[in-house]
Image (cartoon, rainbow, N blue to C red):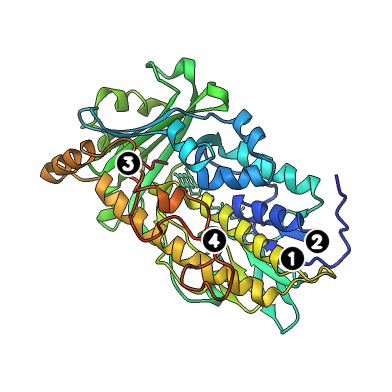
Amino acid sequence: MHTPNLTSTPDIVVVGGGIGGLSTAFALSRLGLRVRVLEQAGQFGEVGAGIQLAPNCTRILDDYGLLDTAKARGVVPDRMVMRDAVDGSELTSLDLRDLERRYGFPYLVIHRSDLHALLLDACRDAGVDLRTEQRVVAYTQDAEKATATTQDGTFHTADVVIAADGLHSVARGLFLDDRPVSSAYVAYRGTVPVAGAGRPVDLSEVVVHVGPRCHFVHYGLRGGDLLNQVAVFESPKAVAGLDDWGTPDELDTAFERTCQDVRAGLPHMWRDKWWRMYDRDPIDTWVDGRIALLGDAAHPPLQYMAQGAIMAIEDGWVLAEHAKRLRANDGTIDWARTLAAYAAVRPEHCRRVVLTARAWGELWHLDGRQRERRNVLLRSRAVHDYSFTDWIYGPTALFPEDEPAMFEPIPLASADRITASPVRTC
Ligand SMILES: Cc1cc2nc3c(=O)[nH]c(=O)nc-3n(C[C@H](O)[C@H](O)[C@H](O)COP(=O)(O)OP(=O)(O)OC[C@H]3O[C@@H](n4cnc5c(N)ncnc54)[C@H](O)[C@@H]3O)c2cc1C
């Protein structure tokens, strides 16, 4: 274990100690860089319950030497199943063991706090300088350095500042004056010991029940001890423009038409906290000089593709891979080229995920005849048809396909063939 040198000037400052910030800090520290993380909260941690990690993420965890621990703390399910929320019938599924063979890495579900703790421990062991109660309020830079300034007026100067400060990113204001886009949907989460779930559940499956204007997800956590459940619905109060939206009375009403399996899960949702679902319109520019956006700060999605945290982890891995390739023999890194490479490869992929997630949500939440048509289409899909997943679960692209002359290209699997997997849940 390395001890951070708290007085030395860091090479990199990362703003935000969420999954994106910590995974990026770890990736860069593996290059021998001095990395400082500034987190506004009083302690590092994650709020929420489960998270799904597809092969495009577990591949990176494996590269970091963290996959075996993640698997031990989570669950590796056999199947992902989409069901109709009204009649409970199966619509389509993914064979996750076959999926693992195809992409080389498993599909894993894990408690957010376990994933976060894994990354935090890795950062500590790598000697990352981890600081809490550090709210960054301003960014400045010149040709040589960038600086993040905290609320108490302290300057944190480094070669590069990475802003991984989430949906409400302060740094994003450097790039444009946009706002989070409300979907009018809200998520309730909850975990319950499997024995107290009130119904038999098969933890070898990740299950999503879809529509109308709602969906319900469940899967196991912590080696199968815990059941994770997520209930998502459109809030009539949000649609009506009221401020007080997404309240528990709306939860109960939203799921009145759903099947018994779904309704049996509702009493186990936490009712004192709920998450209103926002994304932002995609942007192409994430790098300004020596300041770069990463994770939700750059591309917050609606969660329907279950790729938000994964994209953040991919961002950090791609950034570090380019830094490694552009490191001179004396250890100095060509940051201008590194950031240019990052900016060249990541925005298009993430734009596609953000927009596909919106479309995906609309498909899930259909009602009436449209719901019936959707069900016919989904039932006709062959289980082992991967044309929907190759572009997203395949190897993370390091180079843009249209710039082979700039870098030695590693092709992203069939990037333009398909739009989305029919069974991505959150
Ligand atoms: C219901 C739901 C289910 C989801 N399921 C999945 C899933 O299955 N798979 C998946 O990949 N993704 C999923 N996501 C998305 C995922 O949670 C996010 O995309 C991901 O957590 C973003 O990570 P981040 O580190 O970029 O941002 P955040 O997690 O928001 O972290 C930002 C950090 O920065 C800190 N911060 C903010 N401002 C400042 C500041 N000014 N100064 C210092 N620190 C600051 C914050 O305190 C926080 O710690 C889901 C989201 C939801 C809502």
The residue to which callout 4 is attached is 410
Q: Earlier in the sequence, mark 2 or mark 4?
A: 2
Q: Earlier in the sequence, mark 1 or mark 3?
A: 1
* Quadrant of the image occupied by residue 384: top left
Mark 1–mark 3 distance (CA, rounded to whole Å): 43 Å
Numbered disc in front, either 3 or 2 = 3
Q: Is residue 143 left or right of residue 226?
A: right
* Residue at disc 4, secondary structure: loop
Numbered disc in front, either 1 or 4 = 4
The C terminus appears in which quarter of the rendering? Answer: top left
Tell me what residue is drawn at x 28 percent, y 58 percent.
241
The residue to which callout 2 is attached is 34
Q: Is residue 250 left or right of residue 337?
A: left
The N terminus appears in which quarter of the rendering? Answer: top right
The reply to whether the C-beta atoms of the residues labelled 1 and 2 are less than 8 Å apart is yes
Residue, far left: 369
Image position of 62 with respect to 333: above or below:
above
Numbered disc in front, either 2 or 4 = 4
Residue 3 lies, in percent from the top left, at 88, 50
- The 10 Å Cα crowd at callout 4, few under 14, some 14 to 19, many 20 or more, is some
Identify the amino acid type marked 1: Ile
The residue to which callout 3 is attached is 385
Q: Earlier in the sequence, mark 3 or mark 2?
A: 2
- The 10 Å Cα crowd at callout 3, few under 14, some 14 to 19, many 20 or more, is few
* Residue at disc 3, secondary structure: loop
Q: Name the one closer to the observer, 132 or 375.
A: 375
Q: Earlier in the sequence, mark 1 or mark 4?
A: 1
Residue 59 appears in view: yes
The residue to which callout 1 is attached is 12
Q: Is residue 320 left or right of residue 154?
A: left
Q: Which mark is residue 416?
A: none
